[in-house]
Amino acid sequence: MQTGGEGYDKPIRQLYRSLLSMLNVQRMLEVGCGPGVDHVGAVNTNPNIDYTGMDITQQMVEHCMRNYPQGRFLQGDINHIPFADNSFEFVYCKDVLNHLDDWAAGFSELYRVSQRFVLVNFFYGLGKTTFNQKEVLDGYMNHFFDWNEVMTTLTSFNPIAITSYPRVCYHEEVLILLQKS
């Protein structure tokens, strides 16, 4: 597990845990659970949380199942989430959307399975104005997206509220919380 500023104590993860507490989340799905850092955060925030983690890589799912047997983990694809509509009170997706050619299709699935809240991040942040770019970094395809395009697309889902953290988006990591009901 990562430590320090890149792991559990990373400011964006501290904010995630604060939101879990503030919203009193009881049932959640994390898409892109990786090695389980945010599972630990969820359980530490609410020991009774009904947590499900999903990752595209079987290696990460097996790691989580070994290390966090109290959690529920499965292999799956963000574009085909194997749950019914409105299955989870809170759906969280960190460090995934920037890897997708069509982030909106993946987001659509997150929104579909969420009952109340969707929390997503863009780990490179978003451009302040017009800014679209792809790059390969450490063997992974990464996309930078235009802030206006992302917010227009998110608004098209008709949430009752959208909040971004930080409030002003620069070329850095950003969390966006959408409330459905």
Image (tube, rainbow, N blue to C red):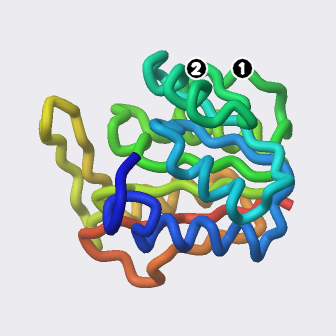
Q: Position of residue 180 (x, y in %)?
A: 79, 58
Residues tagged 2 and 1 counted as in contact (Cβ below 8 A):
yes
Q: Which residue is mark 1?
A: 82
- Secondary structure, mark 2, is loop
Q: Residues within 10 Å of mark 2 (few under 14, many from 20)?
A: some
Horizontal relation, residue 153 to residue 160: left or right: left
Front-lying residue, 178 or 152: 178
- Secondary structure, mark 1, is loop
Q: Residue at x 61, y 58 (%)?
A: 41
Q: How many marks on residues?
A: 2
Specify the quadrant of the image occupied by residue 54: top right
Residue type for callout 1: Pro
Q: Is residue 102 visible?
A: yes
Q: Residues within 10 Å of mark 1 (few under 14, many from 20)?
A: some
Horizontal relation, residue 64 to residue 98: left or right: right
Front-lying residue, 86 or 93: 93
Q: Residue at x 23, y 51 (%)?
A: 132
Q: Which residue is mark 2?
A: 76
Earlier-in-chain disc, 2 versus 1: 2
Q: Residue at x 56, y 52 (%)?
A: 38
Front-lying residue, 22 or 43: 43
Horizontal relation, residue 79 to residue 148: left or right: right
Q: Quadrant of the C terminus?
A: bottom right
Residue type for callout 2: Gly
